[in-house]
Amino acid sequence: MAIKPDIRFLNDMKDVLCDKKWAKSAPNFELYYMYRGVKKRDGLRYDITVIPPRMLGQEFVKTKGHSHAGTYNEIYIVLKGQPLYLLQKSVGNKIKDVYAIKAKKGNVVVVPSYYSHVTINPSKKETLEEANWVYEKCKNIYDSFVEKQGACYYYTTGGWIKNKKYGRIPKLRFEKPLKKWQPKLLKQLSQ
């Protein structure tokens, strides 16, 4: 790729990890790579994120997680690997909805307005590559994840565990991805 990636290092992520004890003594290393603005079309930006297989203590490598400033949707397309997407909706300080989507190459995941989200690479062997379309002026907000030490669930070698910093949270439910890319999704995103 001709575009130089933004690199997310372990030190950038220590505030959102499950295993703080592990993070304290771990060396600062590269976790994943974000190629932003690979394409631009109709006010939308196409990015690619590459997440090699890594472990963060007992937790599988993930993105830092964010919400959007405004009512923006985001569309993810899996290029390689089998990611888990965790989406959560907050109203005030309470989580009102949370669900996970397991996807594979060619699948599409739509992040609705008002949902924060995290991408997880649950593999110890395979690099994950995903693309996304998002409104070019959309700003990512990381504050709620930093404040609560991550999303309301972590994905670990023992499966899904609750993040106790949230108090009461809904039971995690599971949804299916869309099976393929549909150009009309892009049109809906730009409206």
Image (cartoon, grey):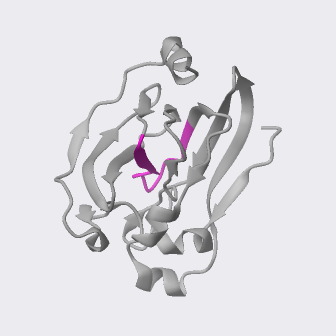
For the N terminus, the image quarter is: top right
Inspect this view and state whether residue 26 appears.
Answer: yes
Q: Is residue 4 magenta?
A: no
Question: Can you say which quadrant of the picture contains the C terminus?
Answer: top right
| Residue 14 to residue 54: above or below | below
On screen, residue 40 versus residue 56, left or right, reads: right
Residue 115 against residue 189 in the figure, above or below? below
Residue at the spot 19% in from the left edge and 65% down from the top edge: 168
Q: Residue at x 41, y 40 (%)?
A: 82
Q: Write the start and end of the magenta stretch as one range.
A: 114-130
> Which of the two residues, 182 or 60, is positioned nearer the viewer here?
182
Q: Is residue 21 left or right of residue 176?
A: right
Q: Is residue 68 above or below residue 152?
A: above
Q: Position of residue 77 (x, y in %)?
A: 51, 30
At which x and y percent is residue 174? 23, 40
List the single residue furthest toward the front.
92
User: Viewed as shown, does residue 6 lie left or right of 49?
Assistant: right
Q: Quadrant of residue 104?
A: top left
For the point 74% across and 49% down, the residue is: 5
Residue 129: within the magenta?
Answer: yes
Residue 122, percent across and down?
A: 39, 52
Q: Is residue 169 left or right of residue 102?
A: left
